[in-house]
Image (tube, rainbow, N blue to C red):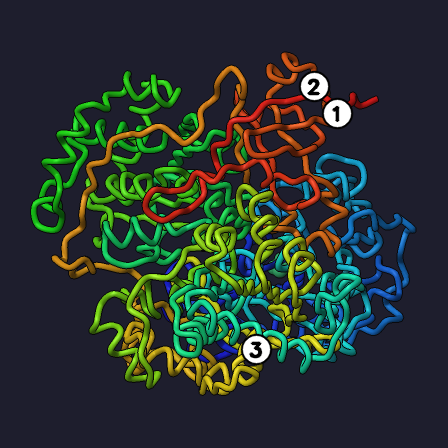
Amino acid sequence: MRLTVDGALVDLAEEATVLSAVRVAGVELPTLCHDDRLTPVGSCRTCLVRLDGRVVAACVTPAVDGAEVRVEEEELSRLRHDAVEMIVSALPPYALEGDGELSRVCRSLGIGPQTAQGGAGRGRDHTHPFVHLDRDLCIACGRCVRMCAEVQGTFALTLVGRGSETVVAPGTGGPWVDSDCVACGGCVDTCPTGALTEPGLPIGTYLAALTRTRTTCGYCGVGCALGVLTRDGEVAGVRPAKDGPVNRGHACVKGRFAHGFLHSPERLTQPLMRGRSGLEPVSWDEALDHIARGLRAAVAEAGPDAVAAISSARATNEENYLIQKFMRVVIGTNNVDNCSRLCHSPSAAGLTAAVGLSGGTDVFEDVEQADCLLVVGANPIDAHPVVGARLLQQVLHGARLVVADPRAVGLACHADVHLRPRPGTNVALFNGLAHVLLADGLIDEEFLRLRASGLPKLTAVLGDYAPDRVAGITGVPAADLVAAARLYGQAERPAIVYGLGVTEHLHGTDGVRTLANLAILRGAVGTDHGFGVNPLRGQNNVQGASDMGALPDLLPGYGKVGDPAVRGRAEQVWGTRVPDHDGLRIPQMFAAVRSGALRVLWVVGEDVCATDPDANRVVEALETCPLVISQELFLSETARHADVVLPAASWLEKDGTFVNFDRRFQRVRPALAPPGQARTDFAIVHAIAAAYGADLGCPTPAEALAECGRVAPVFAGISHQRLDREGAIPWPCPDPGRPGEAKLYLDRFATPDGLAHLAARPYLPPGESPDDDYPLILITGRRWAHYNSGNMTRRSGNIELDPSDRLDIHPADAARHAVRDGGAVLVESRHGQAMLPARVTDEIPPGQLFCSFHFPASLANALTSDHADTVTSCPEYKVTAVRLRVIQESS
Ligand code: FES
């Protein structure tokens, strides 16, 4: 469509508004009740223009082909001026301090602070650690209310009062801190007046005077682009980037607000070394010299395989690249692994076998086009809130939703069908769904004939998985199973999103394979008929740590260390021989320490004593190991058991890149310098190499990524310079002149034969099942305000929102065990004990319990077993048989 704005021709898409036309023409217009992400309401009347002679609110008026829009007319200017002036006249004088939206609008209209003479003394609500409300500054534009509903999907806010007394308030009434607010910060970001602010950026702050650093969030694997605002060497606030490819201006309570840990007095600022009285401060030279001597002694006495490193899914790609290079090139061992071993290694193995590459099959924008979502073993509302919010919006806009998860949390409350399988029965569930797809003819026969293999074998196995039998194994009613399969099977564009509830099992890789079967049967992967199979990654760079080759059997880019051609390419770049046998996986490292085979364990940014299973045995291993090196922000449980502790920089103090859950490389940039003598992991690895007498080359992160591209052609087209220009690039990206592949496998699958591989896997029982001694099943996972071991979130304002761990227990079990809400409970497994306060809730089914592992003091991982996925050694975190003992009752 084409129209004119103040005489200038403007071309517009259909269904655009007059406001869009005005903006395209480059004309400024106040829009105090408008945010491009929200449904326009046209209530403030500050955007008045003339459309073919009529005065209209530009934000809510559709543009018309051939129309004439007038903005710069004296009468219109006066109307807009008067509308803003009337709004401002009700506000207190400080309303126009700072450079917020209202202040800028008033300056542009010549409205001075003398106009703001109102303020009814309606009071403030500063009860929440991150969101502060000044009711006197509220103009009832409703942007915050719509942001909470239309972007976040929490519906926590409302407008209360009448006429000029109308003001935003939590929908639950009472103080903000007790409301349903999930602290995404969206209301603060959209508020035009400063009625809603955050503590570090109160009304009157000149944001333009702050330093803004564009980086990528270092919490979960969503990969939100953030603008970090700093002042005098401290973070004043974090603003989600509106052009962030995944978050689009949204964020969550962690990325947005959990930065208080940066200046925690507990932050490590100098190296520590174990002396007579425990860990004592030493110089970097002393620490590095001790490490180098320990490495030399171990290699000389027991060979290079006596050394192992646990690299970090928190660290950048470049740091992970450097660590694995150090282990392979300098030490001469493949003993390097990362925590994907403990979360998504079954995804890597399962997806590689099924479709060819170790990553999700589609980018998230495509998943958002799905008309049916199958969300399995994931609670993105809590664990990946930005993705959770976008999935929820998709459902609120009509997409069908099947959730498969034992707990009734997050998206499950909005599901068309909620399947609640017994923990450890996923393979039976997925086989049951596949059985129905076959039985009802809901498969893509042409796709299966041309692009997939394995159907006859799968069909034979699926004969044993009729809904009634699956109901017996899983506890899922047969009718629900059939309904779910039909929703997925009849959708035009189905998508699967899954989490650790699929992978962290004794047969986690089988779970991934049998889940992928559903997409393959439907022809919903590698085609335009669906959006594949997409794992939600837990840690910020768990995808990247594996991509960079921090794995004992795979080099950068997932080439096998046993493959001479793959090794040859790396050897050519590195100029030295690469060991040809697989190294140790993380659980094998602890076993090797206990047996005396491993002499040095280097743990980079992982709190293995808190997050790894069977924690008592992990501690035993660390205490046995002659030299344990821990690179950390804080004196974590692991650091306490180390011989040398090196103070490390956080994600806000680093330069490099992360890869998010949908395979996008994005830049990480330092907003601050590390405190004291802390160094980046990149600098620490170089320093250890230098102390050992080695030069790793690639002196900068940019050069490290460039070198990685020479070792792994799938990354060859990605560079810091290109990311600085383009923002985000998905891999595979072998060519610097071409875009990366966002949607995979449209031509062929990346398997050796180019086909998608169906997997015929029978259901096998989990490692532990309830019995007379241990009658309950414990599931562990994450909660909304915290992250992983909690070392960062517990040292931020998030601790006020969620101050302690708790054990979720169904009311029937609570009654049976005489457990009261809030009462202390001793949980016992065959592996250890943990003490937790009870939370009685029907979110968890009878016979099951749930707790997080964010509070190491509660010892949740002392309970979990050493059962692990038979293919990848990923621990069976989701199934531990336990029993309860009540210690005390709450008053
Ligand atoms: Fe158009 Fe408020 S912005 S009426």
Residue on which disc 3 sits: 292
First along the sequence among labels 3 and 2: 3
**Quarter placement of the N terminus:** bottom left
Q: Which amino acid type is marked by label 2?
A: Val
Q: Under tag 2, what secondary structure?
A: loop
**What residue did someone put label 1 on?**
823
Identify the element where label 3 is drawn.
helix
The residue sitting at the front extreme is: 301
Which label was assigned to residue 368? none
Three-letter residue code for mark 3: Ala
Q: Quadrant of residue 361?
A: bottom left
Query: In this image, 85 relative to 645: left or right?
Result: right
In the picture, measured across the screen, residue 830 lies left or right of residue 580, that is right
Residues at marks 1 and 2 touching, judged by CB atoms closer than 8 Å: yes
Residues under numbered marks 3 and 1 in contact, where contact means CB atoms less than 8 Å apart: no
Badge 2 crowding class, 10 Å Cα cut-off, few under 14, some 14 to 19, many 20 or more, is many
> Which residue is nearer to you in this view: 33 or 733?
733
- The residue furthest top is 816
Residue marked by disc 2: 819
Between label 3 and label 1, give the one nearer the viewer: 3
The quadrant where ligand 1 appears is bottom right
Kindly tell me whether mark 2's CB lies below 8 Å from ligand 1: no
Taking depth in this image into account, of 539 and 559 the one nearest to the observer is 559
Q: Position of residue 242 (x, y in %)?
A: 55, 66
> Does residue 487 appear in this view?
yes
Q: Is residue 735 above or below residue 633?
A: below
- Closest to the camera, between mark 3 and mark 2, is 3
For marks 1 and 2, give the CA distance. Answer: 7 Å
Count neighbours of disc 1 (C-alpha within 10 A) and say few if under 14, some if 14 to 19, many if 20 or more: many
Residue shown at the point (74%, 61%) measured from the top left: 260
Label 3 – label 2 distance at C-alpha: 53 Å
Q: Which residue is nearer to you in this view: 594 or 872? A: 594
